[in-house]
Image (tube, helix red, strand yellow):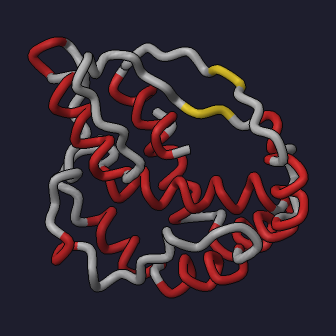
Amino acid sequence: MGIHRALNFKGILYEPVKLSFPGMKPKCEELLDMAAPCADDTVPIIEFLGVNYKALNDLPAILNLFNARFTQNDGFRDLPGVGRSCAAECDRNDITELKGGEEAKVLEGLGSNREPLKQHMASEDDTEEPTYIDFRDAGMVKRIETSSAEKYKVLMDLYGDDIITELMQNVDK
């Protein structure tokens, strides 16, 4: 979800293409209490890398590539904060590696990260523009929403009236 939002934010045109992988839907159903079926998932594929391309699967590397290839000089919005070193983010628990079925841990992590997230958003460089961290955190929220309607409701009941709502509005501009 973070990549789709970043593409939309920067104004990069793309076409969502549905791909089918044998066994994907049954595995998702086995691992997750799915609110939305896996068969409807899409993956952003951008064909601009050329002959010597390198496949990227790490969000910061992908967003750095977007900023490098789709610049403000060419009329695209900049996504600030992507190049930030780990030192700026490491005091917040990294819960991005959690896989299917562990939404409770994501909820717990978002709860423990609530104050650092508020401080981060309050300390943004006086701009309303979302940063890499905003897209990363929004991706975690969307993961919960997609995989478990019940856990998403718990999340929104806990935080929906303030920081999570503000975060999602910020990245959906």
46 sits to left or right of 122 = right
Percent across and percent down for residue 65 are 23, 36
The quadrant the N terminus occupies is top right
Percent across and percent down for residue 165 are 58, 55
Residue 148: quadrant of the picture: bottom right
160 sits to left or right of 118 = right
Residue 143: quadrant of the picture: bottom right
Task: Say how many tags the image has.
Answer: 0
- Residue at x 89% of width, y 64% of height: 30
Vertical placement of 81 versus 118: above or below?
Answer: above
Percent across and percent down for residue 161 are 64, 64
- Residue at x 84% of width, y 47% of height: 23
Please name whichever residue, 164 or 22, is drawn nearer the observer in this view of the structure: 22
Vertical placement of 94 versus 164: above or below?
Answer: below
- Residue at x 51% of width, y 65% of height: 163
Please name whichever residue, 85 or 10, is drawn nearer the observer in this view of the structure: 85
Please name whichever residue, 84 or 165, is drawn nearer the observer in this view of the structure: 84
- Residue at x 47% of width, y 61% of height: 137
Residue closest to the far left: 73
